[in-house]
Image (cartoon, grey):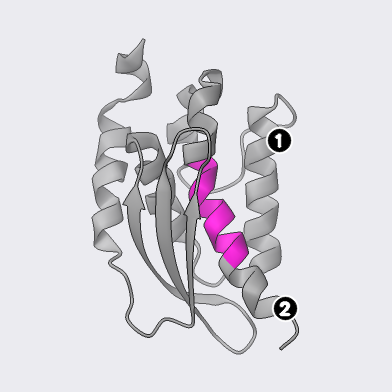
Amino acid sequence: MSGALYNRDILALAVGSADFPLREGARHRVSVRAPLCGSAIILDIDTDEAGRVTGIGMHVEACALGQASATLLARHAEGKNLTEIGAARAAIAGWFAGEGDLPDWPGFDLLAAARDYPARHGAILLPFDAAVAALGEQAAPV
């Protein structure tokens, strides 16, 4: 059961989260915890004037699936804005709920086996939740 879920590709992605250390002086920093599984992430995001991601740093305390999801977010968020990352988060949640196709986020097919494990969904969504929170903070009126 867990062999298919925690495969070599997932584990390789999980260790990839270390390639994105926290960024001192980042424009946005959020700390988010998944209530069901206890996974946590501190996410730093830098953006340009248009609100597009220019850099990500993170500290992830999650299972291998949560760490893998964080790596996929960090590798592919550059140039994206709140609307695009929010849409990806909604597509992932919908797909987990049995609605729609596999989300159109690079590499997400590697997490497809997790769809059958609802207890892991929160950890996988967590990095996207954190990014939406960080970028939404930017969009809020000052």
Quick check: 32 above or below 26? above
Please give left or right for residue 48 compared with residue 8 in the image.
right
- Which secondary structure lies at badge 1? helix
Amino acid type, residue under disc 1 in the picture:
Gly
Across and down, in percent, residue 1 comes to: 36, 10
Q: Nearer the viewer, residue 6 or 40?
A: 40
Quick check: 112 above or below 76? above
From mark 2 to mark 1, how far is it between C-alphas?
26 Å
Question: Which of marks 1 and 2 precedes in the sequence?
Answer: 1
Across and down, in percent, residue 92 comes to: 62, 40
The rendered magenta stretch, by its main secondary structure, is classed as helix
Span highlighted in magenta in the image: 124-133
Asked which quadrant contains residue 41, the reply is: bottom left
Which residue is labeled 1 in the image?
94
What's the residue at 31%, 44% (across, down)?
Answer: 13
Instruction: Please check the rendered image and state whether residue 108 is part of the magenta-colored stretch, yes or no.
Output: no
Amino acid type, residue under disc 2 in the picture:
Ala
What's the residue at 37%, 52% (across, down)?
Answer: 71
Which residue is labeled 2 in the image?
140
Dividing the image into 4 quarters, which one contains the C terminus?
A: bottom right
How many residues crowd mark 1 within 10 Å: few (<14), some (14–19), many (20+)? some
Quick check: 78 above or below 116? below
Which residue occupies the extreme top position in the image?
A: 1
Please give left or right for residue 93 compared with residue 66 in the image.
right
What's the residue at 64%, 79% (across, down)?
Answer: 138
Across and down, in percent, residue 110 comes to: 43, 34
Instruction: Please check the rendered image and state whether residue 129 is part of the magenta-colored stretch, yes or no.
Output: yes
- Which secondary structure lies at badge 2? loop
